[in-house]
Image: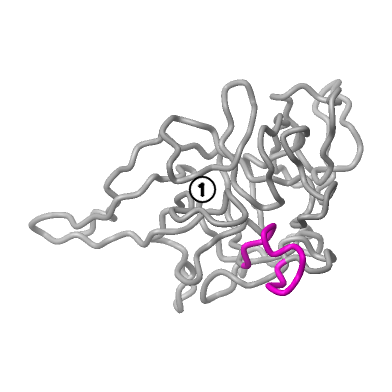
Amino acid sequence: MAQLVGQGPSVLAGGGTSAFFTTPFPHTPGDKARDTEGNEYLFVDFIATVYYGCVVQITPQCTAAPLLDTAAAAFRVGVVCGGQASTVAGDHPTSDNGGWVQIYGIHTAVQTGAASGGLVSDNTVAGYWCVPQASVGTPSGTFSVILQTAGTSIAQSSTDGNVIYNMWLIDMATVTDMNRLTTYPGASGASGPVSRNAAAGIAGAGDTSGANTSAFIGNTYAVFLNYPYVLGNTVPLSNATS
């Protein structure tokens, strides 16, 4: 859980980024805050059930719901920070709640349905597009990656995808000195996403035999967010290498 730091005269409700609230909300949807490491968060009104580490689409009214591959409009994108990866009632935000999503900075445990790919054996993260999960499972709002395709000197080869712009995979080996790694669960492994509890200390989360399987898909990536968004268009993806 990140501790929020008020900007100017703002007063922030307690509980840090993991807190979520019922009406009347202590913040107006659209309020922003930063933590001590410069990561930025947006307060939203959730209009569907969400879980920690899942990706949401954010409307101009700052309502948020799981981001799906079928999104056919332009939305801002954020990562859910409120609650836990647990299906237990009261452990996660629902359509009755408001809470924080991260829109800028490093999040070390974003839920992904990708079983492999990204951070390949050479430890690079370049060459991968972040996209909404094409095959929606449980929980809704996980993301996937598409490897950029190499072009030729005659014609570019490409694949299609609904890109999450301004969201990139990162190699956690480059940021191991970050203090928040001791408090944020999950980190990308050198050979791909890791199977790891997306909410440390929650019994059963990420355990296929546990009660919280539908709250944690089983893998996480570390990502850098720079006010990500989608346009709702499936576009050709190529690395334009000749």
Give the quadrant of residue 163. Answer: top left
| Relative height, residue 10 to residue 119 (above, below) | above
Q: Residue at x 71, y 37 (%)?
A: 41
Q: Is residue 19 left or right of residue 220?
A: right
Question: Badge 1, how many Cα within 10 Å: few under 14, some, many 20+?
Answer: many
| Helix, strand or loop for the magenta stretch, by majority | loop
The quarter holding residue 16 reads top right
Q: Residue at 41% of width from left, 54% of height from top?
A: 129
Residue sitting at the far right: 14
Left or right: 224 as drawn, with respect to 16: left
Q: Amino acid at mark 1?
A: Met
Q: Nearer the viewer, residue 184 or 71?
A: 71
Does 37 sit above or below residue 205?
Answer: above
Span highlighted in magenta in the image: 206-218
Q: Which residue is mark 1?
A: 167
The reply to whether the magenta stretch includes residue 169 is no
**Numbered disc 1: secondary structure:** strand
Q: Which residue sits at x=88%, y=26%?
A: 11
